[in-house]
Amino acid sequence: MVLKCIAAVLSAVCAVLCFLRNMHIFQLNSYKSATQIPWLFKNFGRLIPSVFFVLSGVLSFFAGDVWSFVLLTFSALVMALSHLPRRAKKPLKFTARVIRMTFTSGILYFGITIAAFVFLPDAVYAVTAFATALVPFIIMLANVINSPAEWAVRQWYTSDAKKLLRAADNMTVIGVTGSYGKTSVKFFLGTLLKAKYDTLITPENYNTPMGVVKTVRSSLRPIHEMFVCEMGAKYKGDIKELCRLAHPKFGVITSIGEQHLETFGSLETIIRTKFEIYRELPEDGILFVNGDNMVITDNLSRMEGKCRVVRYGTAENCDYRAEDISVSGKGTAFTFTVPGGESMRFSTRLLGSHNVVNIAGALAVAYNMGISLVELVPYVKKIAPVEHRLQLIENGNLTIIDDAYNSNPAGCRAALETLSFFEDLKILVTPGMVELGALESELNRQFGRDAAAVCDYVVLVGEKQAPPIKEGLLECGFAEDRIIVVSGIKEGLSAVYSIQTDKKKIVLLENDLPDNY
């Protein structure tokens, strides 16, 4: 009897821990079953303790002896330990939605166990074990059951945000989207517009409809004259939805490239999704596009839109052009020329030519908002590095270039270019790139080839993306004894400290995988 009580308690603990783990992943996967189910199959190895727990529950039903309950207790303990909370980069947030899903999931789970206790008392442990193993699917079922209520809640909050935006009829909305660079351009533009306007920007990486709604409802004030709204996307139609919420007059496309291919499916879908902002802008609006991005320029002519399009960047055909770029370990300087020929020399603490392109985009928008180049000079100097996006951190004999926020092929190339500006011992620490679908291995292999031309040492974190990167490095003749493979980022940094050298170490942290990888 005591053993059965212990097994029952452990089963309940398993259910709670399993729920917290899978609810965290479901939140990271944007509450979408279409993303969660492939994740479960891809990480099937994590379900082995659950399978073992179910089998031991079934054995307890058929055997019913002491040893079967010993096995059940042991398997419950193993499953509980396998689902213990881990230190997360982005912990589970107990939002109102999560609380509602917890309530519905609890009703479903306890409904199954109570029904088993009433109708199948001899099989109650087997059914409970099975219900616990089904927790990932119970969560998704709870999401389906709650969907009408969630839709109503979203509609209420969204309608309230739209009402607030309509009331701010003197405020100009600027939408910023792109496969990469959009967060940087948003922050840069927010800094520049403050030269003349009270400006609101979406904070951090708030770039979903509910993130924009939350920003508007919590932060929009009558004094705001500009609203810079970051617009992210993982699925076709996401940008259109955001535009119909915020109604931007001006838009910026910072880049288009291979990112989130797992959800988009193809580069063509990404192109059409990013250009949704073009179709949604009014006739008297302006779309600013990165003229250095070949995917944008090659597809611009076939996309539908009513407003004027201007290009910014370093290419000769750009309307707003940055040139005479000089880069050092202390920052970057460049000359910026606008239509009509007026030029001004700017300097920034930021590193890399890609940051010059991003600043050029922000300058082009700010200039069109009536801010002169002379007025913008001190504000460009004020632009601060965006956290975890090529952020320079000095630590004694170690300089860290923190580019850990996320990673994509173009971003990796830009980060390696930045690393190449330094003269000392150059070390890359990376887990590689993810969410690239069928192209993931080849793009990581190319990342290795690119890294071989720049780095002195490469520390590869984890086992999934490491092999193709290592293959790319070795293809280019990179010394195998200078490739270090470790299991986690802490071990990676320990490996960096253990490298013996008389030179200063320059360490590029390229990408830090989210908790669902």
Image: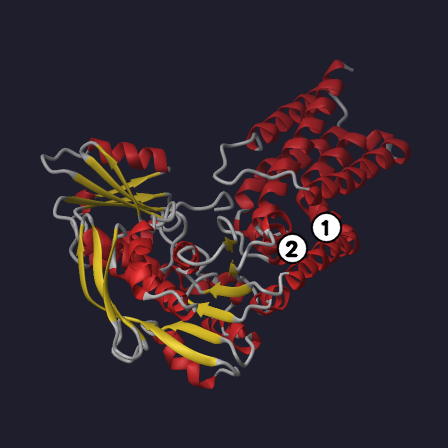
- Residue 354, position in %: x, y? 29, 61
Q: Could you say whether the residue bearing mark 1 is in a helix, strand or loop?
A: helix
Q: Give the class, few, some or many, for how many residues have Cα within 10 Å of label 1's Cα (few <14, many ≥20).
A: many
Residue at horizontal 53%, vertical 52%? Answer: 206
Contact (Cβ within 8 Å) of mark 2 with mark 1: yes
Disc number lying in front (2 or 1): 1
Q: Which residue of the protein is positioned furthest toward the left in this rendering?
A: 502
How is the protein colored in the picture? Answer: secondary structure
* Most foreground residue, 186 or 53: 186
Residue at horizontal 47%, vertical 64%? Answer: 176
Residue at horizontal 62%, vertical 65%? Answer: 169
Q: CA distance from mark 2 to mark 1?
A: 9 Å
In-image side of 189 versus 12 (left or right):
left
Amino acid on which the number 2 mark rests in the picture: Ser
- Which residue matches tag 2? 33
Amino acid on which the number 1 mark rests in the picture: Asn
Q: Which residue of the protein is positioned furthest toward the right in this rendering?
A: 118
- Which residue matches tag 1? 143
